[in-house]
Amino acid sequence: MEQEEGLTAVDNILSQFNTYEDFLDSQITTVDLYYLEDEVLARQLVELGYRGTGEVVKREDFEARKAAIEIARLAERTQEKTLTSAGKDLKDNFLKALAVREEDNHNGKVSLNQQEAGAAQTLKKQLASVIFIRDRNSHGQEVSGYIDYAHRLKTEDFKVYFNGKRRLLPRSTDLSFYNWDRHIAVCNSSPNYQVIADNPEGLLFKYKRDRKILNVDPKAQPGDNSTRVPIQTELYIQAVIFDHISRRKT
């Protein structure tokens, strides 16, 4: 708590002053300058806490917090540029659904509205979407599978999908893949999900961060903190997105 209050105090000062010297000068009174007759000495006394009209803030704390804020700002700008769906004129509902979820899956967090901002101080929320697709591949064979969206975003450039040059299809390296014509079935755990393939009631995925189970059976509830969203699309025979939100105390 004391650390959070300290950061808040430094942040308040950073919002008012560009440099540490500007902050020190704001703490010096005309009376100080009259008796000390030395601006440098007056600054040193404020820095040591012997003079000043406000809270004592160390130079290293000021500079460290300023650097951290600048790094976060640059990271945010970089992230905005890396969103492959940004600026695309998306027509199909499936691509629109992917675009809405791209940033949160890429960053492993959930974008919060103002009503949720209070909860964000005590809970860290992470979004991990699983995409189900059923369609025909380039050979005309019917395939289906479940895709760990966050993992594919980190290992593949999605520009070709958002540009419409290629269609996103399940692969034999995804969470699950089934070729209906050749009767080939493959399951793979990902960095985010553990595949539970021996469940008698059907395929399950366990999210590794909170160990919650995602049930993809359309006749069952998807599980705690999970939702099932069927997508009306012209690109595929069937498309469904499962959104799992992990809530962990920070």
Image (cartoon, rainbow, N blue to C red):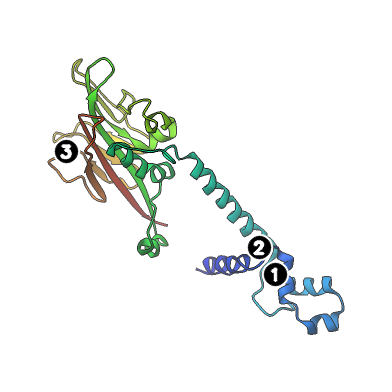
Residue type pointed to by label 3: Asp
151 or 91, which is in the foreground?
A: 91
Q: What element carries label 2?
A: helix
Point out residue 231 in the picture as x, y percentages from the top left corner: 23, 39
**Residue found at x 38% / y 33%:** 162
Q: What element carries label 3?
A: loop
Mark 3 vs mark 1: in front: 1
**Residue found at x 54% / y 66%:** 3
From mark 2 to mark 1, how far is it between C-alphas? 10 Å
Residue 61 relative to residue 223: left or right? right
Q: Name the residue under label 1.
A: 23
Q: Name the residue under label 3.
A: 217
User: Above or below — where is 85 with respect to 246?
Assistant: above
Residue type pointed to by label 2: Phe
Q: Which of marks 2 and 3 is nearer the N terminus?
A: 2
From mark 3 to mark 1, how far is it between C-alphas? 60 Å
**Residue found at x 39% / y 46%:** 104
Residue 85 falls in image quadrant: top left
10 Å crowding of disc 1: few (<14), some (14-19), many (20+) = many
10 Å crowding of disc 2: few (<14), some (14-19), many (20+) = some
Residue type pointed to by label 1: Phe
Q: Earlier in the sequence, mark 2 or mark 1?
A: 1
70 or 202, which is in the foreground?
A: 70
Point out residue 118 in the picture as x, y percentages from the top left corner: 39, 65
Q: Quadrant location of the C terminus?
A: bottom left
Q: Residue 62 carries which label?
A: 2
